[in-house]
Every structure is written in structure tokens, then in C-alpha cells.
Image: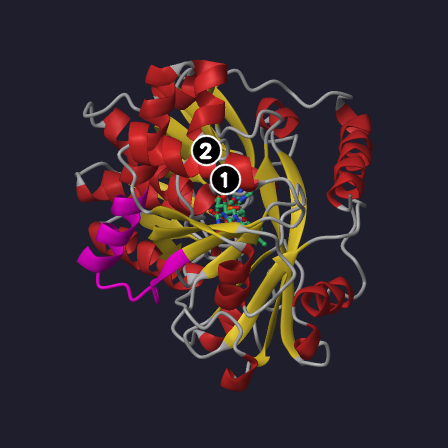
Amino acid sequence: MEWQSPIAPGLSWYQVTLKDRPTYPMLDGSVSADVAIVGGGYTGLQAAYQLAANGVDVVLVDAARFGDGASGRNGGQLGTGQHWWPEEMETKLGQARSHAFFKLAEDAKSHLLDFARAHKIDVDFRPGQLTVAHKRGMEDSYRHHIDALADRYDYPHLSFMSRQETAERLGSERFFCGIRDIGTGHIHPLKLLVGTAKAAAKAGARLFEQTKALNIDRADGRIAVETERGTISAERVLIACNGYIEEHLDPRTAAKIMPIRSFIGATVPVPKSKNVLPGGESVDDSRFVVRYFRKTPTGELLFGGREAYTANDPKDITRHLYRQIAEIYPSLAKIEITHAWGGSVGITLPRHPLVEEIMPGVTSIGGFSGHGLMLSNYCGKLYAEEILGRSQDLDLYRDLDVPAFPGGGPLRKPLLFLALTWFALRDRF
Ligand SMILES: Cc1cc2nc3c(=O)[nH]c(=O)nc-3n(C[C@H](O)[C@H](O)[C@H](O)COP(=O)(O)OP(=O)(O)OC[C@H]3O[C@@H](n4cnc5c(N)ncnc54)[C@H](O)[C@@H]3O)c2cc1C
């Protein structure tokens, strides 16, 4: 029987089409290490690989199986830059920092593709990303963004798409204009995750699945990570639980990273005659509650978004996906969705990742706010490089203020869902 993630609903198309997904043992007994990592998504596994490859003794535990969180179930779109466009960042943080953040994201993109190449992980990379306007009035800001990146950020890969070009490239007349980015693309996220775990294990990291960290505390000058069947004693700890962080493990991170469920459906292969995304690019739209879609190399449409603003998962994930697909592609109104799944996107209030020292020797990294495919991998690498004394680039994020969500405790989620519902309503006008 197929494995069902215990922390996210539905079987993903990635999982059922990827046969080679090794399992790792549970931690049974107490161990000692230089670094303990809690969380086996991209952040944790990349950090584990980089540390182990450089001779650091690492133990990593995940409460579920690697990739059961966001890293094995996401939209696969790399994107470019951070959540905020550079010109928006300039006004908030100034030119120099905005440039540094853009460079970091470009380094993250190269790192991801270089890492996959070096470790012979076939991540099904396909080039091209289309960002499209779901409402009128976005043309000026799109043109301004394209010019800013070409003139000030040495990024000449964007071009403006008229309404007609947008329609041709999407095979849909639903959008008003767009930006084409030929400097990025999309991948099979679970292949990257599985490959990273294999690389980490091969480099000597000790990896454990289905091993939940229950408590983290300092004891006798070291840090103790307590799990059900044993304690890890380490000099340093990385908390890489992202949207799955629980209050009892680390209340500070839990107050700052809110899990928002996002859902994806995979259809049967779309007939070529439908002319959907003939260039093979991935798409994200301009909604606050973004819709994102792309075709796989074998022609299935992977369509992501969310609709229901409750903390609970909808009973039928496919219902709103069918409607959203039909809005964009009326000719696909009756196409069969074969797999539908969800996952938690960890978002922070300012939509910047969180990098914070929780206690001496314990760093928490997460909250990539929907832009974590490149950035979480790279932050894992930067965390390792910091320990190895090679880079302080994580300070860029560490220096940003990431406040707790208002409301505190039980009020936090209802307040957030209220706010999101408001923004979702605005998307409609
Ligand atoms: C549906 C969806 C679509 C997305 N699409 C995109 C996209 O197209 N592009 C993009 O850039 N980003 C996207 N994202 C976001 C991206 O996937 C994440 O930013 C990224 O994967 C974060 O990786 P991570 O390692 O920090 O966290 P995760 O992959 O979420 O991993 C956290 C891990 O921590 C473990 N954990 C939690 N608590 C404990 C504990 N107590 N003990 C042990 N382990 C624990 C969990 O089991 C989990 O495996 C999407 C996310 C989702 C859910």
C-alpha cells in the first residue's frame, strides 16, 4: 500500500510516480553528535549533506518520512528572487540590502541546479516561468519590474507579455498580461528531496525517519534533543520544521511561522490538441492567494491553489481545483484529476524567512512563505557554511525583524484566516 504522509493530506502524484524512495530507520537509543538537525525537508537535509561532506558528525531526525512536509509535495516552481520584488525591497531595506538579497536568491538557484547535477539527481528541470495578471492595471508595474531587473540587477531574462502573447503561451485567454522569465524553471520536488537525502546519507550523516523531537534543552554545556526512544546530545541544533513546527518544541518559532495549507491536483495527461502551455513553462498568477500550475514532462497538468479558509483540510480537495482549472481552461472542465494532495506552506508576517537563535547553539530556520524551493536548500547550505566558518550570509535574514503573528496562542489562527479571507475577497475585484 502507498505510504500516506501523516502530516499532510492526499497522495501526491510525485510520490506515486517515483518508485525509488528509500526509507530510513527510527532512532532507537541515545546518540551523540556535533550537530543535531530536527526536520528532514530541504533545509535540514541540505544542511546535513553539507556538514557531513565536510567532516562534521550529524544526526537528523524527522517526525514523518523525508519529504512528507512541504519539500516533497510542492509546486516545483523555482521562481527568481525573494517574495518581495527587488524594487519593493529597495524602498523597505535600501539598495544595498536589496541587491544582496537578489544575489543570494540567484546563488540559491545556481546552487540547486549545480547540486542536482553534481549528485546526478535527475530533477526533470524544465525552463521558463510565466507570471500572469489576473486583473487589469498591472502592466505598468510589470514593465517597471522588468526594467529594474535588467538595469539594476543584471538580470536580462524577463520580458513583457501582451495579452495576446500571454494567451498564446498559456493556451488561455483568462489573463490580461504577464512576465516571461527564461532565467528560471520548474522541477520534480520529491526527486530533489530523495536525492538530497541519499547524498547526505552517503556523505555520512545519520538519518532517522518517524522520530519526533519532543523537547530541546540545554544540559551540561550541550544540547539535548529528546525523542521517544532516545536523546541526541549535540553541540548545536538546527530546527528545520518550517510550517510543521509545534509550540511544545519551540514556542518562539511556532508564534512566527503560520502553516497555511495549499493544495495541488494532477490531471491525466492533457491532449496536445488543447494547446495548454505549449512552451512547457510554469505559471503563477497575481492573486494574493496565488494559483500556480505547470505541465509535467509526461503531460499531466499540476494545478495548485487554495480556497477554503479554515484551519481544517477540506473533505474533498479536488472540488475547488476542478472549478479553478475550468475558470482558466474551460475546455478542461471535465478532465480527470487523478491525484490531489496538500501541504503546509510556512509563512511569516513580513513574508521573509525566519533565521533566529532560539537559545545558545540552537538555530531555527523556516517560514519561506511559498518561496522555499531554492531558498530553503540554500539556507541549509548557508547554515552549514556558518558552522564551518566559511560564510555569514545567513545574517542577511537573521537581521530582519520577523514578529510573532498577532493574537497569541489559540487566537492566532482564526485571526489569520480572517485576514486571508479578506485578501481572497480582494482577489476577486
Ligand atoms: C503545496 C505546496 C506548494 C508549494 N509550492 C512551492 C513552489 O512552487 N515554489 C517554492 O519555492 N516553494 C513552494 N512551496 C514551499 C516550499 O515547499 C517550502 O518552502 C520548502 O519545502 C520548505 O522546506 P523545509 O525543509 O524548510 O520544510 P518542510 O519541507 O516543510 O519540512 C519540515 C519537516 O520537519 C519535520 N518536523 C516537524 N516537526 C518535527 C519534530 N518535532 N520532530 C522531527 N521532525 C519534525 C516534518 O515532518 C517535515 O518533514 C510549496 C509548499 C507547499 C506545501
Q: Residue at x 41, y 74 (%)?
A: 297
Where residue 225 sits in the image (x, y, percent)? 47, 33
The range drawn in magenta is 109-128
The residue wearing badge 1 is: 142
Instruction: Look at the numbered discs 2 and 1 and tell me whether their residues touch, using CB distance below 8 Å.
Output: yes
Placement of the C terminus among the 4 image quadrants: top right
Where residue 120 sits in the image (x, y, percent)? 22, 64
Placement of the N terminus among the 4 image quadrants: bottom right
Amino acid at pointer 2: His
Mark 1, other Cα within 10 Å: few <14 / some 14–19 / many ≥20? many
Q: At numbered mark 2, what does the secondary structure look like: helix, strand or loop?
A: helix
| Of 258 and 98, the residue lying toward us | 98
| Of 276 and 11, the residue lying toward us | 276
Q: Is residue 269 left or right of residue 186?
A: right
Residue 417 seen by the camera: yes
Magenta-span inclusion, residue 118: yes
The residue wearing badge 2 is: 144
| Of 251 and 366, the residue lying toward us | 366
Amino acid at pointer 1: Tyr
Q: Residue at x 50, y 84 (%)?
A: 272
| Of 232 and 38, the residue lying toward us | 38
Q: Is residue 290 above or below residue 366?
A: below
Q: Is residue 159 above or below residue 34?
A: below
Q: Residue at x 66, y 65 (%)?
A: 328
Q: Is residue 350 left or right of residue 209?
A: right
Q: At numbered mark 1, what does the secondary structure look like: helix, strand or loop?
A: helix
